[in-house]
Amino acid sequence: MTGSRPDKKEATGSVMVVGAGIAGMQSALDLANSGYYVYLVEKSSAIGGLMARLDKTFPTNDCTM
C-alpha cells in the first residue's frame, strides 16, 4: 500500500451536480472526496453563481475578483 491513503475509498458510482454556484461547487467537492465520480454542470459560461457577480463582499468590502 505504498502511496495510497487507507482512508480513501474506491469510487463507488457517479453523480451529477447541476449548478456550479457556491453550493454546487462545495457539494461536488464533498462528493468527490467521498469517493464518487462527479460531473458538475453549469448552464452559463462561468462558475460561481450569484457570488461571481458581486464585486464587494460584506462586511469587509474585499474584492471577490
Image (cartoon, rainbow, N blue to C red):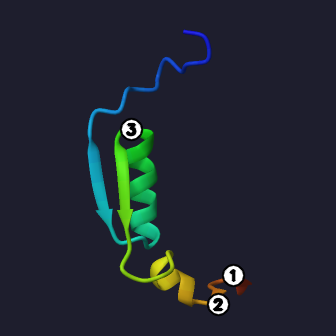
Q: Between disc 3 and disc 1, whose residue precedes?
A: 3
Residue assigned mark 2 = 55
Residue at (42%, 83%) from the top-left corner? Answer: 44
Residue assigned mark 1 = 65
Question: What's the CA distance linking mark 1 and mark 2?
Answer: 7 Å
Q: Give amino acid for label 2.
A: Asp
Instruction: Determine crowd level at label 2: few under 14, some 14-19, many 20+ residues with C-alpha closer than 10 A.
Output: few
Picture disc at residue 15: none
Q: Give amino acid for label 3.
A: Ser
Above or below for 45 versus 29: below
Q: Given contact means CB atoms under 8 Å apart, are the residues at marks 1 and 2 in contact?
A: yes
Of the pair 37 and 49, the residue shown nearer to us: 37
Q: Given contact means CB atoms under 8 Å apart, are the residues at marks 2 and 3 in contact?
A: no
Q: How many marks?
A: 3
Residue at (55%, 89%) from the top-left corner? Answer: 53
Q: Quadrant of the C terminus?
A: bottom right
Residue assigned mark 3 = 34
Residue at (36%, 80%) from the top-left corner? Answer: 43
Tell me the SS state at disc 3.
Answer: loop
Residue 24 location, quadrant: bottom left
Q: Between disc 2 and disc 3, whose residue precedes?
A: 3
Question: What's the CA distance linking mark 3 and mark 1?
Answer: 30 Å
Q: Position of residue 13 (x, y in %)?
A: 26, 39
